[in-house]
Image (tube, coloured by chain):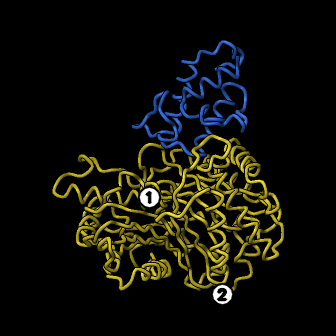
Chain colours: A blue, B yellow
Amino acid sequence: MSTGNLSRLDPEEVARAVTDFINTTIMARTRPVRPDDDLELAGLDSMALLKVLLFIEAHYGFWMPDEDLVTDNIRTARAFAAYICRRSA
Amino acid sequence: MQALWKREGISNNTLMVVHCDGPLDHARIGRALDRFLDFCPWPSARLRRRLPWGPLHWAAGARAALAAPPVRHKRLSSPGALHAELEAELNAAIDPRREPPLRFAILDGAAEAAGLQSALVVTWFHPLMDPRGGQNLLAHLAHLDESDGRAPWGGAPSVFVTGADPRPLKERGRLGRSSQRYMRTLVPEAPVSPGTGLTSPGRVRFEQASFVGDDHGLGGVRSTREICWRLALVGSTMADLWRRRGLPDLPFLVPVSIDLRPKGEPGATFGNVLAFHFARFKPSETADVDRLTRALRQQMTDALRDGQIDANAVAMEFLKYRPLALMLRDLPGTATRETFSFNCADLADFPPALEKLFGRRVTNAYHAPSVLPRPGVGVFFNRCGIKNNLVVSWIEGAMETQEVARIIEAIREGMGWRAAH
């Protein structure tokens, strides 16, 4: 994904991209998550969280700072997407 | 095994203790275990070398030649006898060259007001499985017990061992060498540990305590579920020990295990399914736990970004157990026979699917791994239902019991937990 049009990010598209990343690199193939699933309940641990942060850095061009790693921003793929879109607006 | 202790008969055992609300039937467990061997030989494997100079690997014969691991049954005379029995299990080192790499024991408690309670104890030679693997084995046995007479796993047996890394040998070799180079740069000097100076190690001991209290999930200012936060808290208790003993302010070197299984399903049972990250921080940096957590998170992120965790994973191979030997060859303290400053791991949740086992309800479950004489101490977390379990394992001579008690109390206070009854 290009990082040149961050101000026009579509939250649905971002949620789908984050969900796809989690399902292809973290989750078992038989246990995919959906955008509104609680990621910690789905089994994501500290290392998995860091993988998602690296994905965001690589695809959206910024690092989520420690102070933003609050439950409201990381509970679900959609929450990540909302944060990414806010940060990029 | 560290060369220093090669002929000392050091235990590499690890325990999983599962408390149940009533007596367990050892014949049921024996039957499930025997049936499991129809699908998977590894509980009866032996550690072998193909050639005297070759690498160690697990080997198992044909089904007819496989004998199920032993299931011992014992009635305890008093409630206090359980702990002594568990420590004896931990110290009765399994020699996987000559005996099965795991064994079971059912320890029936003395009659109590709540009735007779049992503890199921699974003891294994730790390279056979990691803690999650031990839980998976138990889940498989429980499934076989429940599906007695029917085709288990819906007729499609589970995957018990992780498949081989599909990457070409050349690529794996490159990653392995990269991991070795990285490990040599971790800390400038050999770390010290409570076991430094031990030349004649004592028995393995452990203390377990259960607590209740809210954990703060991933995210939030004090994300107490996060391994970096827990490691920072444990590091602060170790720094206190260092101060009391007058140990130097050299960087701690602590291995952090990372479960490589895909999330959402149990994954493999046998073999190594872990990679290691190596956390480094000085005792003097532990005063501010939140700040240290951020620094440790940054270290872990850098290791992930640089591919070091993937490279470490490549260095681990099932059926050719070499990880510890590899670490000991490449870590900065090898020359002085030091390894790590202490061990620390969060062994996560005991699977909710195992709330019933062989017809009994599970009331608590925890792991008690042995630690090597150096570092001589390890702190392990896990959860079972609402209980937060804390286990401190140590080597006699490296730690005093009052030092262990101080560590447990400091962690309880730091986590904001209260004793579970």
* Closest to the observer, B291 or B177: B291
Q: Is residue B137 above or below residue A75?
A: below
> How would you rate the neighbour count of disc 1 (Cα within 10 Å): few for under 14, some for 14-19, many for 20 or more?
many
Question: Where does the image place residue A39, in percent across and percent down from the top left?
Answer: 51, 37
Name the residue furthest front. B113
Q: Which chain carries label 1?
A: B
* Closest to the observer, A58 or B192: B192
The residue identified by callout 2 is: B200
Residue B145: which numbered mark, if any? Answer: none
Mark 2 residue type: Ser
Q: In this view, does B352 lie to the left or right of B34?
A: right
Mark 1 residue type: Gly
Question: Where does the image place residue B275, in percent across and percent down from the top left?
Answer: 59, 54
Q: In this view, does A85 lie above or below B223?
A: above
Helix, strand or loop for disc 1: helix
Residue B133: which numbered mark, if any? Answer: 1
Quadrant containing the N terminus of chain B is bottom right
Q: Mark 2 lies on which chain?
A: B
The residue drawn where x is 38% and y is 64% is: B42
Evaluate whether residue B99 shows in this view: yes
Helix, strand or loop for disc 2: loop
Residue B36, quarter of picture: bottom left
The residue drawn where x is 66% and y is 52% is: B229
